Image: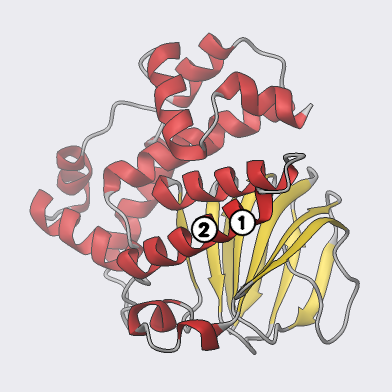
Amino acid sequence: MSESDQQGPKAPELTAVHVPGFVIRLGVHPGGSEIARHYHDDPTICYVLRGGFTEYSRGEAADCGTATLKVMPAGEPHSNRFGTAETRGLRIEVDRERFAEVPAIYRALEERWHTEGGRGAELAHRMVSELTAADSAGPIAAEGLALELLAELARIGAPRREASTPAWLIAAEEQIRERFRTAVSVGEIARDVGVNPATLARGYRRHYGCTVGERIRSLRVRHAARELIETAEPLSEIALRAGFYDQSHFTNVFRRTLGVTPSAYRAGLQ
């Protein structure tokens, strides 16, 4: 998702569109590849269409898989290591001066943070569709979607960072990642980590920028998206293994999150 502005190899580029206030690019990285430490002159928004990578910045590592939307401020040094599978993604370079009089947008682009799924993912997928359509109106539509995406990021806001994350919150996140394919509830997780459900709900949203339910849905969609790429299993089996009630439930959640149905997602990648 990153292109070296200072050193290291440039990312292979499929499509680049220049519209007022934005440069929107589609790119692909081979599995197992890396991009050396670098920075960008403008804030960037990246969206992972398939695959994933780990980003290293300020001594921290952030794992970004399918349906992750990531903001990187201008001038922030970072490096990227891609997973074993090919990674495809969308990158938007933003001219902050165009939005200098919109404080919420300006602030959203000044912090390094990421979110998963939701309205932002839907807008990113629609943007990809416009960029790849053989239509002269595509760039105009992509510009409008980029503006909507900025507004959505401004509404969400970067998650608050705490100097010391409570042990119970770390334990809750570990449980969610281990149990997301089961019928786990906020009450069960709260009981297991020793806090009140309301405390868990408030603390989790404040720290991670999403609700427990949104995280579980996002993890299920990411798991299913990986299975769609790596296996030829029927959609019904993938749905059950990912934790969805049935194929219909899977299809509805997947489409709301990624903007396409599971079958269209698989067909598009093939």
Task: Note whether 26 is above or below 183 in the view shown.
Answer: below
Image quarter (top left, top right, bottom left or bottom right) of the N terminus: bottom right
Crowd class of label 2 (few under 14; some 14 to 19; many from 20; radius 10 Å): some
In the image, what residue type sits under mark 1?
Answer: Ile
Residue drawn at (67%, 62%), measured in percent from left and top? 91
Q: To which quarter of the image does residue 235 belong? A: top right
Task: Classify residue 10 as left or right of residue 174.
Answer: right
Could you tell me residue 257's position as x and y percent?
45, 38
Residue drawn at (46%, 21%), measured in percent from left and top? 251
Residue 196 visible in rendering: no
Element under disc 1: helix
Q: To which quarter of the image does residue 94 belong? A: bottom right
Task: Note whether 126 is above or below 269 in the view shown.
Answer: below
In the image, what residue type sits under mark 2?
Answer: Gly
Q: Distance between the residues labelled 1 and 2?
A: 6 Å
**Pointer 1 residue:** 140
Using the image as rendered, state which of residue 6 and residue 260 is in the foreground: 260
Image quarter (top left, top right, bottom left or bottom right) of the C terminus: top right
Could you tell me residue 17's position as x and y percent?
74, 62
Element under disc 2: helix
- Labelled pair 1, 2 in contact (Cβ < 8 Å): yes
Residue drawn at (44%, 89%), measured in percent from left and top? 100
**Pointer 2 residue:** 144
Give the residue furthest to the front: 136
Task: Note whether 228 is above or below 216 in the view shown.
Answer: above
Task: Note whether 106 is above or below 51 in the view shown.
Answer: below
Using the image as rendered, state which of residue 264 and residue 2 is in the foreground: 264
Number of labels in the image equals 2
Could you tell me residue 115's position as x and y percent?
45, 58
Task: Classify residue 68 as left or right of residue 244.
Answer: right
Residue 225 visible in rendering: yes
Crowd class of label 1 (few under 14; some 14 to 19; many from 20; radius 10 Å): some
